[in-house]
Amino acid sequence: MWYTYVLYSKSSGKSYVGFTNDIERRLFEHNVSETKGFTLRFRPWVVVHTESFDSKSDALKNEKYLKTGAGREKVKQHIAAYLNGAVSAAAEKD
Protein backbone atom coordinates (compact mmCIF):
# COMPACT_ATOMS: atom_id res chain seq x y z
CA MET A 1 0.00 0.00 0.00
CA TRP A 2 1.24 3.51 -0.87
CA TYR A 3 0.15 6.77 0.72
CA THR A 4 0.08 10.45 -0.10
CA TYR A 5 0.26 12.58 3.03
CA VAL A 6 -0.03 16.20 4.09
CA LEU A 7 2.04 17.45 7.01
CA TYR A 8 1.48 20.69 8.88
CA SER A 9 3.74 22.63 11.23
CA LYS A 10 1.77 24.70 13.73
CA SER A 11 4.89 26.59 14.79
CA SER A 12 5.56 27.92 11.28
CA GLY A 13 2.21 27.55 9.51
CA LYS A 14 3.95 25.60 6.73
CA SER A 15 2.67 22.50 4.96
CA TYR A 16 4.43 19.65 3.21
CA VAL A 17 3.09 17.05 0.75
CA GLY A 18 4.80 13.72 0.12
CA PHE A 19 4.24 10.03 -0.60
CA THR A 20 5.51 6.88 1.07
CA ASN A 21 4.79 3.24 1.75
CA ASP A 22 5.33 3.69 5.53
CA ILE A 23 3.74 6.78 7.07
CA GLU A 24 5.02 6.20 10.62
CA ARG A 25 8.62 5.83 9.43
CA ARG A 26 8.34 8.86 7.19
CA LEU A 27 6.88 11.06 9.94
CA PHE A 28 9.73 9.97 12.22
CA GLU A 29 12.22 10.93 9.53
CA HIS A 30 10.63 14.35 9.05
CA ASN A 31 10.54 15.05 12.79
CA VAL A 32 13.68 13.35 14.10
CA SER A 33 16.18 11.70 11.83
CA GLU A 34 16.53 13.91 8.74
CA THR A 35 19.63 16.07 8.75
CA LYS A 36 18.86 18.26 5.73
CA GLY A 37 15.92 19.48 3.68
CA PHE A 38 12.82 21.62 3.92
CA THR A 39 11.09 19.78 6.77
CA LEU A 40 14.11 20.03 9.07
CA ARG A 41 13.61 23.78 9.51
CA PHE A 42 9.94 23.72 10.49
CA ARG A 43 9.63 20.92 13.07
CA PRO A 44 7.50 19.54 14.62
CA TRP A 45 5.17 18.16 11.94
CA VAL A 46 1.78 16.49 12.31
CA VAL A 47 -0.07 14.43 9.71
CA VAL A 48 -3.29 16.23 8.78
CA HIS A 49 -4.36 14.05 5.84
CA THR A 50 -3.53 10.74 4.18
CA GLU A 51 -4.83 8.93 1.11
CA SER A 52 -4.02 5.31 0.26
CA PHE A 53 -3.26 3.85 -3.17
CA ASP A 54 -2.54 0.39 -4.53
CA SER A 55 0.41 1.55 -6.61
CA LYS A 56 3.38 3.83 -6.17
CA SER A 57 2.60 5.57 -9.45
CA ASP A 58 -0.93 6.48 -8.30
CA ALA A 59 0.41 7.89 -5.04
CA LEU A 60 3.00 9.91 -6.95
CA LYS A 61 0.32 11.25 -9.31
CA ASN A 62 -1.75 12.37 -6.33
CA GLU A 63 1.28 14.02 -4.72
CA LYS A 64 1.93 15.95 -7.93
CA TYR A 65 -1.73 16.98 -8.08
CA LEU A 66 -1.65 18.27 -4.49
CA LYS A 67 1.28 20.49 -5.49
CA THR A 68 -0.72 22.19 -8.27
CA GLY A 69 -2.92 25.26 -7.78
CA ALA A 70 -6.11 23.23 -7.38
CA GLY A 71 -4.32 20.71 -5.18
CA ARG A 72 -3.00 23.45 -2.87
CA GLU A 73 -6.58 24.50 -2.25
CA LYS A 74 -7.36 20.93 -1.14
CA VAL A 75 -4.31 21.02 1.14
CA LYS A 76 -5.56 24.26 2.69
CA GLN A 77 -8.95 22.60 3.29
CA HIS A 78 -7.32 19.64 5.02
CA ILE A 79 -5.30 21.98 7.25
CA ALA A 80 -8.38 24.06 8.09
CA ALA A 81 -10.30 20.90 9.00
CA TYR A 82 -7.41 19.76 11.20
CA LEU A 83 -7.17 23.14 12.94
CA ASN A 84 -10.93 23.36 13.49
CA GLY A 85 -10.90 19.86 14.95
CA ALA A 86 -8.00 20.77 17.25
CA VAL A 87 -9.83 23.89 18.41
CA SER A 88 -13.04 21.95 18.97
CA ALA A 89 -11.25 19.25 20.96
CA ALA A 90 -9.52 21.88 23.10
CA ALA A 91 -12.80 23.70 23.70
CA GLU A 92 -14.46 20.48 24.88
CA LYS A 93 -11.82 20.11 27.61
CA ASP A 94 -12.73 23.49 29.17
Image: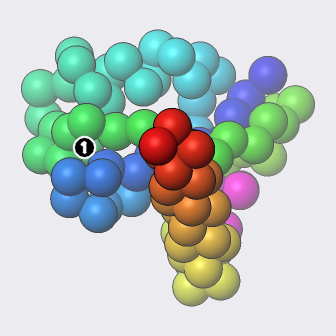
Q: How many marks?
A: 1
Q: Residue at x 46, y 14 (%)?
A: 25
**Magenta stretch secondary structure, dominant:** helix
Q: Nearer the viewer, residue 74 or 59?
A: 74
Q: Nearer the viewer, residue 74 or 69?
A: 74
Q: Residue at x 47, y 43 (%)?
A: 94
36 shown above or below 4: above
Residue identified by numbered label 1: 39
Q: Residue 85 in the image: x percent, y percent?
A: 60, 52
User: Along the horizontal axis of the image, is 84 left or right of 56?
Assistant: left
Q: Nearer the viewer, residue 56 or 86?
A: 86
**Residue 64 magenta:** yes
Coloration of the structure image: rainbow
27 shown above or below 80: above
Q: Residue 13 in the image: x percent, y percent?
A: 29, 63
**Residue 62 magenta:** yes
| Residue 3 placement: quadrant | top right
| Residue ranking furthest to the front | 94
Mark 1: which amino acid?
Thr
From this viewpoint, is residue 17 visible?
A: no
Q: Residue 73 in the image: x percent, y percent?
A: 60, 80
9 shown above or below 52: below
| Residue 70 placement: quadrant | bottom right
Q: Residue 50 in the image: x percent, y percent?
A: 68, 41
From this viewpoint, is residue 9 visible?
A: yes
Q: The N terminus is located in which quarter?
A: top right
**Which residue range is magenta in the image?**
61-66
Q: Residue at x 63, y 61 (%)?
A: 81
78 shown above or below 72: above
User: Along the horizontal axis of the image, is 29 left or right of 92?
Assistant: left
